[in-house]
Image (spheres, coloured by chain):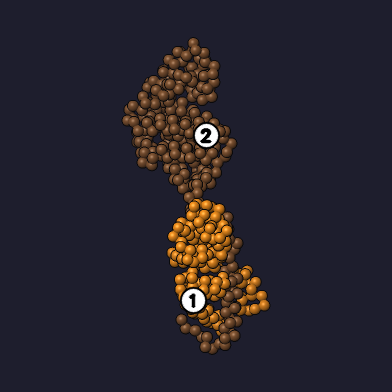
Chain colours: A orange, B brown
Amino acid sequence: MSEAHLIARVLEGDRLAGRELYDAHAPRVYRLAYRMTCDEDMARECTQDAFVRAFSKLGGFRQEAAFGTWIHRIAVSVVLQAMRSQRRRSARFVDMEEAQHVAAGDDTHDAELASRLERAVDELPEIYRTPLIMHDLEGYTHAAIADVLSIAEGTSKTRVAHARAKLRDTLTALRDR
Amino acid sequence: MTSRDGERTPMEEERMNETIRQTLAASRRPPEPPLDAMWVQIEQRAFGNAKPRLVLHTRTSRWFIPTLAAAAALVFGVGLGWYAAPRNVVTQIVAPPVATVASVATTPASQHTASTEAIPSNTENAESVASASPSQGSARVQEAHSVATPRSPDLTAARLASQFNDVGGGSEMSRYLAQTTLLLASLPSGHATAESDTAVATRAGELLTQTHLLLDSKAGSDPTLHRLLEDLELVLAQVARLRGQRNGTDLQLIHQTLTAHDVLPRVHDATIEASITD
């Protein structure tokens, strides 16, 4: 069944069609929300809010873009709003076990590195941080990022490059110590 | 944003990028998304799903639900009339319906004396209806009228109080709401004795404990029900303090709370809701 048909059915109040759309996109939306927030509860709430918002505004969705792009646009907006209103920096954590797992065989991948990089990512301005996470951690293309964030593709590339440069400086500073 | 990239080769930068990517990917690794749990919330909010259902026992028989709803509505009406009416005519307002009920469901002759002193139970009354002969009727009506006269205003409260334990067969929440309605409808009048106060206060104490349990239960997580339970907690705590030695302000405070928070109408709504949910 095509996405357009599913959307039409959701507009008629068909919950099963809603669930189908949700199943197709929720895992990726949740992953992105988690990558951006590093907080399980917040990621869950943002995913829920994004879908509720999407379904309630579905009547105004003109289908000029894919539903996937649209729901991601909503999700990023919800996440950023949530992060602005709730600066849960303390909730952000470094999974020491994971960090040490990566560290096997390479001295740079230690817990301190992970912690410093996390902090550096947190300190990045929002406009750099979001494209970086989307591109480098979640594998979105620059075209998709441009669609979701309503920016030019070139802008997405530039911002990711800026973010990386900043993180490389952090990495270098850590190595130079 | 300044950078020290000028000092590095492109290959070195690429290797650093990969290190950064791997580190962040590991430290921000998402857990499995709770898809079903999230969908429940989304469905409720986006599709106007039914309100969160009360978690109640479902051993209720089919006929009990409408009966309970009707009984609750009846008691609610009596209760509403009771506390809406001026205090000095309370006894007269409550007395006639009780007299009517009592005239149909009076106790056997052997229990007449006891019925004016002790608290009879519903079961006894129901049995007496089945066994009563027509010849006994007029004497019982007379007796019932004497029971309901203003000379013994506390008996109405005492009779209603005695019925608290007889409201059974429904779910925990339905039973609780029906019992609370009965209690609130049978609050002692200004002329109540210490005995009737104690009976009602004791029952209020029991219901208060039940209120606390319900507040901590899943049923109490429903926001509307939670607010109602909190208001009932306040009222029941006030009623539980009625121990004979009281002044007029005690009852006044209770009635103020009932009126200010629309407690009885809300209990009524919740009773209907719970009976539907059963």
Q: Secondary structure at mark 2?
A: helix
User: What count of labels does the image hold?
Assistant: 2
Return the mark for residue B257.
Answer: none
10 Å neighbourhood of mark 1: few (<14), some, or many (≥20)? Answer: some
Q: Residue at x 49, y 84 (%)?
A: B3
Q: Is residue A82 visible?
A: no
- Where is mark 1, residue-wise? A153
Residue A76 vs residue A7, the one in the foreground? A7
* x and y, in percent, of residue A47 in the image: 52, 61
Taking A73 as reference, is B111 above or below it? Answer: above
Residue B190 vs residue B131, the one in the foreground? B131
Q: Residue at x 49, y 66 (%)?
A: A65
Q: Is residue B11 visible?
A: yes
Q: Amino acid at mark 2?
A: Ile
Taking B250 as reference, is B24 above or below it? Answer: below
10 Å neighbourhood of mark 2: few (<14), some, or many (≥20)? Answer: many
Q: Chain of mark 1?
A: A
* x and y, in percent, of residue A94 in the image: 57, 69
Residue B31 image-quadrant placement? bottom right
Q: Secondary structure at mark 1?
A: helix
* x and y, in percent, of residue B231 in the image: 42, 42
Q: Amino acid at mark 1?
A: Glu
Q: Residue at x 37, y 31 (%)?
A: B81
Q: Are marks 2 and 1 in contact (CB under 8 Å)?
A: no
Gap between marks 2 and 1 measured at Cα? 63 Å
Q: Are marks 2 and 1 on the same chain?
A: no
- Where is mark 2, residue-wise? B65
Q: Is residue B261 left or right of residue B272?
A: left
* x and y, in percent, of residue B82 in the image: 37, 30
